[in-house]
Image (tube, coloured by chain):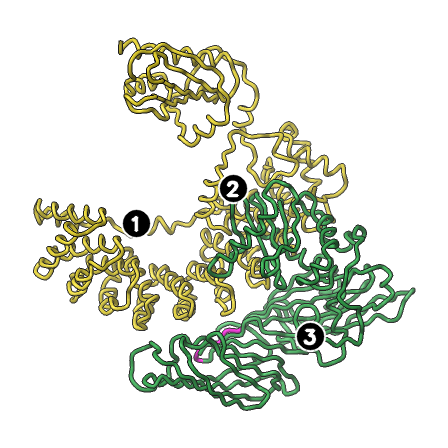
Chain colours: A green, B yellow
Amino acid sequence: MISQFFILSSKGDLLIYKDFRGDSGGRDVAELFYRKLTGLPDESPVVMHHDDRHFIHIRHSGLYLVATTSENISPFSLLELLSRLATLLGDYCGSLGEATISRNVALVYELLDEVLDYGYVQTTSTEVLRNFIQTEAVVSKPFSLFDLSSVGLFGAETQQSKVAPSSAASRPVLSSRSDQSQKNEVFLDVVERLSVLIASNGSLLKVDVQGEIRLKSFLPSGSEMRIGLTEEFCVGKSELRGYGPGIRVDEVSFHSSVYLDEFESHRILRLQPPQGELTVMRYQLSDDLPSPLPFRLFPSVQWDRGSGRLQVYLKLRCDLPPKSQALNVRLHLPLPRGVVSLSQELSSPEQKAELGEGALRWDLPRVQGGSQLSGLFQMDVPGLPGPPGQGPSASAPLGLGPASLSFELPRHTCSGLQVRFLRLAFRPCGNANPHKWVRHLSHSDAYVIRI
Amino acid sequence: MPYLGSEDVVKELKKALCNPHIQADRLRYRSVIQRVIRMSKLDQWGQAEVLNFLLRYQPRSEEELFDILNLLDSFLKSSSPGVVMGATKLFLILAKKFPHVQTDVLMQVKGPLLAACSSESRELCFAALCHVRQILHSLPGHFSSHYKKFFCSYSEPHYIKLQKVEVLCELVNDENVQQVLEELRGYCTDVSADFAQAAILAIGGIARTYTDQCMQILTELLGLRQEHITTVVVQTFRDLAWLCPQCTEAVCQALPGCEENIQDSEGKQALIWLLGVHGKRIPNAPYVLEDFIENVKSETFPAVKMELLTAVLRLFFSRPAECQDMLGRLLHYCIEEEKDMAVRDRGLFYYRLLLAGISEAKQILCSPKSDPSLRLLEDQAERPVNSWALDFNTLVPVYGKARWATLSKCQGVEHHGPELPNTAAFPTSGPLIPEENKERVQELPDSGALMLIPNHQLTAECFEKTWLSLKVAHQQVFPWQGAVHPDTLQMALQVVNIQTIAMSRAGTQPWKAYLSAQDDTGCLFLTELLLEPANLQMQISVKQSEARTETLKSFISVLETVIGTIGDIKS
């Protein structure tokens, strides 16, 4: 199957190289790949071909994980393998990054040895691998509960305002056995990605929510846990539960190790997770959000073609419930070519706007639900082509692109799905009660508003 | 090796799936297959491998087929995309005689594919989009209701956006055409020129069925006077004017004014072609062409000049008074001053054509064209699922069929005959060995008589490759006098079914010829004839693809007879 596997940093340095079959090239193939990759005009296609070999790669955390093969194999399997390897390496080394990989080279090679044999996948289950991996992970600094550095929890990166073991992400899951008596914790994240497309007349063209329930467990494997979801949670358009509209998703899929016997009746998922990360459930919802969209933008554009003056007034309205807020809101508005200067008036001092790379970036660190924020931006754009006409016009000049918003909504799910409880089976030889952290989070995937 | 379970199961599996003798024992084979399918506790990699193995199995009866499909049904709902796609491919191949089962399976896989298309992993997204396109070739309406999922988002990488635009172009139907066109219209003004051009071409593709709306959009785009947009729009117009005669009117109305905005070769060619063919309906056509003629000296692209010649000539036939003068000037320039030979040749050709008579020339250049709509129907014929079922879930859709064909040619993959023992413990999805090849592998008794098959054709590359890989089986020297007459020799060899791959011209020194022949058992005979200068001998070297002395001797004798006869005739 796979002939070689290597990991490159974003600058092309070879961090890890492993040849499984010895039938193609040597280490220089990695350099070849990097040159080909950077030689392409735009971002690279996933599969490239050179000299009888296919190169397939993924980008993860700034690293390139590349596999070569000379056979015509399934791209889905191979991409899945590369993603799984990325997760596995992250689990073992704490996080996936250039620094952690360079520190843990021996561990990585040992892992690769166990996972792949002569290019065929043996197993990627952390359970089975635990018995074979002897090397310890090297962490940059010892774990401390009082470390409030802003390394985000796995998955989305956020600023947590409450005290939380936020450096849990950088702690390797499967560390030495002596550590087992320490923190027994389990983190459950309900993460939703919101994709929205709004047309220039304000109508909603597309809304899509992709949600995942992710579990990161430091508990010893085999401990059973039950996750209870909202009871009125319906799947598909025709199902009805409880009274009222309920919480609906279009499609759901579960990890293969989840027992669904109580799902039908009480919406409870039962599983015995291994240590490490696991995606328990995935769901999708399109076109029918129960709550209003979090942001609406009301732009108005004044463009004086003669003097080349462009004035853009943006009013951003947040439609979240008053108690919620959105964090790290950033609006990115591409501007026409040749924008010379920018003057701005923003409605609140903590906002910032600047011009960079042909686009306007407006940063709002915190937006309270129900509030309205506005910004007036004036620019000089000499010599801009566009539809013929004299005098000022209200139509947008060419190149004033769609505005895209990126934001995080802590403690909020767009679909309304909530985790009611997370119960662990009673452990007779119990240590201190394991800590359970449940978090709901939505963030924008591609929130685009056309001007 | 993949972890498939206990040792003995794996052993059985290996034996059954790779050994042709076991394959022949269908009962044992079947029981192994059943055990394999019922294996539980396989992780997703094991499942994917099992599905891959099963591709080589051909169920004996319809019952057995549906039995297997029922057992494997749960794999279609797995959470691992590799397993789902592997299962889909297996179903599509096993059920190749049951198109309704195939359609059913493709319905079931719609959900997982769409989920993969919106996955966080861009690479998975890309692979899924390529497969969606593959499916759309056979079932164009399959994803029409989910067109919104294929709208491009601003932050997506370029390669994904291009795929999505192609998909949008192919899933258009009456219900979604309005929204899809609006969306594509938005993309046409994108900052990235490549993407905008791809969107415009997609609109052009849709225009073949929904002409009016698309023409409106394209005409509006011309109004923006952007160079990269205008050139692609004009190229689209050219294609449409050819394929959809009904929009010629709209095209002709939209054209005036474009010439100011086009600078690149492709755009100019398209514009000039349109002016030439439909110049009658465009009032200022001669003046635009005249502009081009004025600047022809500074024109860098020969293709544009060639197009210009043809177009002006065509326009001359429909508007002679206006064009006569400039045609003369253009021809004069092309014949007297032009350095590019192709352009000059065409200018000369047209000039002589005109000398032969204006009406004759008109008949040649402006005769009725073939009906373009016929070709259009052929292009759009839906390909049956079976034509691409084998390529599903492999790298072929990801590269695209055209690129894959180039890649396989470069690799020079030629598997002559099956190599049974080497097809490995863990074969990839190669096709099941057909019955005919199996027979060839067995040793046939050597027959004394040699039967060379007629109409044997061997390509030059194949000959070279085989020649270099074999050792000389026989070498001998034949008395010869004087030079060789290649034609006579070639004909004589043809009579005895020996093909001439290459032969030097008469009189070259040294004189060489390469011949090939194949007998009815498939054994190849490759021969080199060498005549050294000042030598009274011709050297014959024969290489045989299978070592059989009897047949070799027969072949040598045949060759000797022919060469001897030619030598005798000559002398």
Q: What range of the chain is rendered magenta?
A: A196-201
Indicate the chain on which mark 3 is placed.
A
Is residue B149 one of those drawn in magenta? no
Indicate the chain on which mark 1 is placed.
B
Establish if B425 lies above or below A126: above
Q: Which amino acid does label 1 sit on?
A: Leu
The image's mark for residue B97 is 2
Residue A433, quarter of picture: bottom right
Q: Nearer the viewer, residue B236 or A8?
A: A8
Residue drawn 18% across the image and 53% down it: B309
The lab-note entry on whether marks 2 and 1 share a chain reads yes
Q: Position of residue B347 (x, y in %)?
A: 16, 49
Residue drawn 74% across the image and 80% down it: A162
Tell me how far mark 3 sits from mark 1, CA to CA: 58 Å
Q: Position of residue B334 (x, y in %)?
A: 17, 52
Q: Which of A225 and B382 is in front in this view?
A: A225
Specify which label sits upstream in the sequence, 2 or 1: 2
Q: Characterize the local packing of mark 2: few (<14), some (14-19) or many (20 or more) Cα atoms within 10 angstroms.
A: few
Q: Characterize the local packing of mark 3: few (<14), some (14-19) or many (20 or more) Cα atoms within 10 angstroms.
A: some
The residue at which mark 1 appears reads as B374
**Viewer-side label of 3, 1:** 3
Tell me how far mark 2 sits from mark 3, CA to CA: 49 Å
Residue drawn 70% across the image and 44% down it: A117
The residue at which mark 3 appears reads as A440
Helix, strand or loop at mark 3 = strand
| Residue B209 visible (yes or no) | yes
Q: Position of residue A30 (x, y in %)?
A: 59, 51
Q: Where is residue B530 in the image (x, y as percent from the top left)?
A: 38, 19
